[in-house]
Image (tube, grey):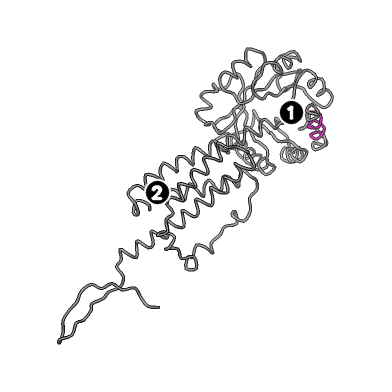
Amino acid sequence: MSKSVEITSFKESNNRVVVMVEPHSQKAQIQQVVYRILDANLDRAREGLRIIEEWCRFGLNNAQLLGECKYLRQELAHWHTAELRAARDTPGDPGTELTHPQEEQRSSIKALLQANFCRVQEAMRVLEEYGKLYHPNMGKAFKQMRYRVYTLESSLMGYERYQLLWRSHLYLVTSPSETLFKTVEAALKGGLTLVQYRDKTADDTVRVEQATKLRQLCHSYGALFIINDRVDLALAVDADGVHLGQQDMPIAMARQLLGHQRLIGRSTTNAEEMQKAIAEGADYIGVGPVYETPTKADKAAAGLEYVSYAAQNSSIPWFAIGGIDANNINDVISAGAERVAVVRAIIQAEQPTLVTQYLVSQLHRIKL
């Protein structure tokens, strides 16, 4: 293979003109490498955005998120010049053969979206830095686009979670159990889409381990995973949100820590607490305890009257909770509940899948 050369000078010798040549300049070689890097990462970012865009279009039917994806792809196309494309050398690229087991499968839509957001953000960071060697405005442009992708990720993941929250009618709040993971998975198989991890007595090391396993389990079934009380634990295990009691931190402070992409729920026992939670920005509320329950032994039952009040006055999703099971769920539904949260009804059930299926079927029957 002939090497690229550059004519550097002419010299006369014995009445002959000698052309002095040397290998293609180092500057030109580096330029070609930079062009290849930019081309590869523009491809990577455009591909990742298209995958995200398809979910915004067909999965969420969200025109705003779809429009943002299209805008970002068009901006990428603007920078993807013929000059950069011409530097492409796919056969000579050793990176085309590299892969990782995690890239071979996706456990859920959420995992797929997060993987592609990471792909886009990493590519844009590369484009931001190497772009400074290509065009005076490229680094600045991709810095701004990278921030827009961060915002898009927060908006999309928050929207996804909120959509699933609205579609969820049965909410399992866990209690310590030797068969915790087996029981939760059985309920997920029965159609459960919302789980809260609640353990008031375990050490933090145990909580982190159990919460991590439960989050992975829930996400593998496409369900939301919420942490009781602990904002720090919710962040540590990448939960979908946190559920706060009346004595826990203010919703505004939790929102500042969690951001707008995660869900925040609040327990309420009366109309005043409900209206305050809504005004403070809770994404959903618990309404109860409807019946007396050992889970809330220090609180008197709020009764079905509060359920009826919530049905008439709550502008956000709400879950009737407290002593609800297969024997009384229809009374709660008759009082106006469309969503309920349970603990013992599933955690202590001999057949969690069947109990879950029954509870879900009764709640879905409301819409028929």
- Left or right of residue 189, residue 249 in this image: left
- Left or right of residue 345, residue 261 in this image: left
Distance from disc 1 to disc 2, alpha carbons, whole Å, reads 50 Å
The C terminus lies in quadrant:
top right
What residue do we see at 79% from left, 34% from top? 356
Q: Position of residue 366 (x, y in %)?
A: 79, 26
Circle 2: is it few (<14), some (14-19), or many (20+) Cα within 10 Å? many
Q: Is residue 104 above or below residue 169?
A: below
Task: Using the rendered image of the protein, determine whether residue 35 is visible from the camera's viewpoint.
Answer: yes
Q: Position of residue 21 (x, y in %)?
A: 26, 76
Q: Quadrant of residue 296?
A: top right
Nearer to me, 18 or 165: 18
Nearer to me, 158 or 65: 65
Q: Position of residue 312 (x, y in %)?
A: 70, 16
Q: Amino acid at mark 1?
A: Val
Circle 1: is it few (<14), some (14-19), or many (20+) Cα within 10 Å? many
Nearer to me, 72 or 167: 72
| Residue at the bottom extreme, as displayed | 14
Q: Which residue is the site of mark 2?
A: 128
Whether 235 is among the magenta residues is no
Q: Which residue is the site of mark 1?
A: 343
Q: Which residues are magenta?
A: 355-362
Q: Is residue 312 above or below residue 164?
A: above
